[in-house]
Amino acid sequence: MQLALDICSVYRYNISGTVDDMILDFSKIKLIPGGKLEFQFEEALDPLAYGFGEFQLKEAVSCQGQALHAEGSFRVEGQYHTMTELSCSRCGQLFQSPAAGEFSVCFVSGNQVDWDGEQDLYELSGDAADLGPVIAGEIFFSLPMQPLCREDCRGLCPHCGINLNENSCSCREEEIDPRWEKLKDLLNQD
């Protein structure tokens, strides 16, 4: 059996083509305990197809990694990088930001549950695993909660709505809430 492991344990994918190419086929390593599948692809990904409409991708996702067969499951680890398009939380302008990271998930068949909550489990579809939702989720969770086009973004004027990064406005900055107007009168009694 050791000879079979040495000859058959590593399969390589170099994927390029349609979105369906984010699917890893484990059929060649499913019968080999410890079998390894290495993969590398550069593929377009539509985050909206997986329920993530908060960002767009401006280029294909580059991904590489390996899958290891162990005890009826497949541990998939890898790295990804791409360019996202986000909307600034202060001024609303679209800007591009790189997204890169690592992932480690486990694909299982049936209704296996990780009671300890230590693994990200995904269900196998036959002998195949779709990395699309994994990578879309990883990109989403790596994004800032309040993306900024730049650190010193001045945002929009709360009165006239002009983008303060591009123009200045003549709005009074000392607009006082009418509920506090009487306090201002107390200061001016001198």
Image (spheres, rainbow, N blue to C red):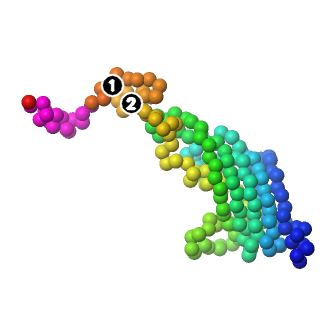
Identity of the residue drawn at 81% across and 69% down: 35
For the residue pair 187 and 113, the one nearer the viewer reads as 187
Provide the secondary structure element on which disc 1 rests: loop
Identity of the residue drawn at 52% across and 33% down: 93
Q: Please, is residue 187 above or below residue 56 in the view?
A: above
Residue 157's disc number: 2
Residue at image mark 1: 171
- Relative to 190, 27 lies left or right: right
Q: Position of residue 179 (x, y in %)?
A: 20, 39
- Relative to 51, 11 lies left or right: right
- Relative to 169, 175 lies left or right: left
Q: Position of residue 99 (x, y in %)?
A: 62, 46
Q: Within 10 Å of the Cα at label 2, are there few (<14), some (14-19), or many (20+) other Cα atoms?
A: some
Judge whether residue 73 can be spotted in this image.
yes
Identity of the residue drawn at 56% across and 36% down: 95
| Mark 1 residue type | Cys
Residue 134's disc number: none
Specify the quadrant of the image occupied by residue 125.
bottom right
Identity of the residue drawn at 48% across and 38% down: 151
Pick the quarter of the image with the N terminus: bottom right
Q: Are marks 1 and 2 in contact (CB under 8 Å)?
A: yes
Specify the quadrant of the image occupied by residue 177.
top left
Q: CA distance from mark 1 to mark 2?
A: 8 Å
Q: Is residue 7 magenta?
A: no
Which residue range is magenta in the image?
175-189
| Mark 2 residue type | Cys
